[in-house]
Image (spheres, grey):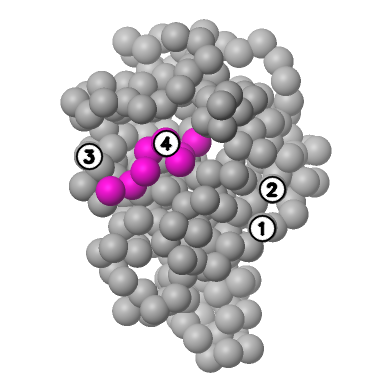
Amino acid sequence: MKNALVLLSGGLDSATTLYYVKNKLKPKKIICLFIDYDQLALKEEELSARNLSQKVKAEFKKIDLKWLGNISQSLVNKKGKIPETNPRNIASEKKHLLNWWVPSRNTIFLAIALAHAESEFLSKKEKYEIYIGLKHEGKIPMKDTTKEFIQEFNKLAIHSTHHGKYKIIAPLIDLDKDEIVKIAYNLNLPFESTYSCYIGSKLIKNRLVHCGICSNCIQRKQAFYWANIKDPTSYKNI
């Protein structure tokens, strides 16, 4: 297959995507793009992404996008009161979506990945396909996490690059998070090396620690529960 460029945050979804690409698709080369958009969990995410890239022998590239964090009002970027997430009905938490929304985040991330893929082809004649770890978000998805979004971006890629033959792929887009945990388990993904928390927390005895109460932490807990796989995650608040 072609080489692979993976957008890697260090979270469960992007990490599973990386291990799927590495172990199932077996590209010759993998580049992992990590985006610094001044997120609160930057240090933990970067540590996770760097470790995962090293484990699969992929090239790691860090992109400075701090300006996005500066214009964002999301709780991913700004400290504030964490809205209570109802674990029993997380799919209905529409009223809280905007708390976590970063302006045009996935559009910007994919545009950056596309530019890198085109650069690799123009400079080295090496073709890269772009992978992003979007998953099925249920009845109330964020607008930039859908199959329609990926389809439209692929159309944009045709018109926004010189050769127009670049492809954006979201291999987990039809899967729920518990299904992703099962796939990750079968791919031998080191769960302890992944980081999902929006808020961030200090390392404790060299272990990544999750806050345990943000939306992403709740989803992570539920995913392991429904997958019937032991959750090795360290949570600050249980």
- The answer to whether the residue labelled 2 contacts the one labelled 1, judged by CB atoms less than 8 Å apart, is yes
- The answer to whether the residue labelled 2 contacts the one labelled 3, judged by CB atoms less than 8 Å apart, is no
Quarter assignment of residue 119: bottom right
Residue designated by label 1: 62
Marks 2 and 4, Cα distance to the nearest angstrom?
Answer: 21 Å
Q: Residue at x 58, y 81 (%)?
A: 120
Q: Say which amino acid is labelled 4.
A: Glu
Marks 4 and 3, Cα distance to the nearest angstrom?
Answer: 15 Å
Name the mark nearer the viewer: 2 or 4. 4
Q: Say which amino acid is labelled 3.
A: Lys
Position of the C terminus, as image quadrant, is: top left
Is 75 above or below relative to 109?
A: above
Q: Earlier in the sequence, mark 1 or mark 4?
A: 1
Q: Estimate how packed mark 4 is, as few (under 14), some (14 to 19) or many (20 or more) residues with alpha carbons within 10 Å.
A: some
Is 162 above or below relative to 9?
A: below
Magenta region, residue range:
188-195
Name the mark nearer the viewer: 1 or 4. 4
Residue designated by label 4: 192
Question: Nearest the camera: 2 or 15?
Answer: 15
Q: Earlier in the sequence, mark 2 or mark 3?
A: 2
Does residue 209 show up? yes
Q: Earlier in the sequence, mark 2 or mark 1?
A: 2
Is 41 above or below relative to 17?
A: above
Residue 15 location, x and y as percent?
42, 48
Residue designated by label 3: 182
Residue 30 location, x and y as percent?
46, 70
Q: Say which amino acid is labelled 2.
A: Asp
Q: Earlier in the sequence, mark 2 or mark 4?
A: 2
Mark on residue 36? 2
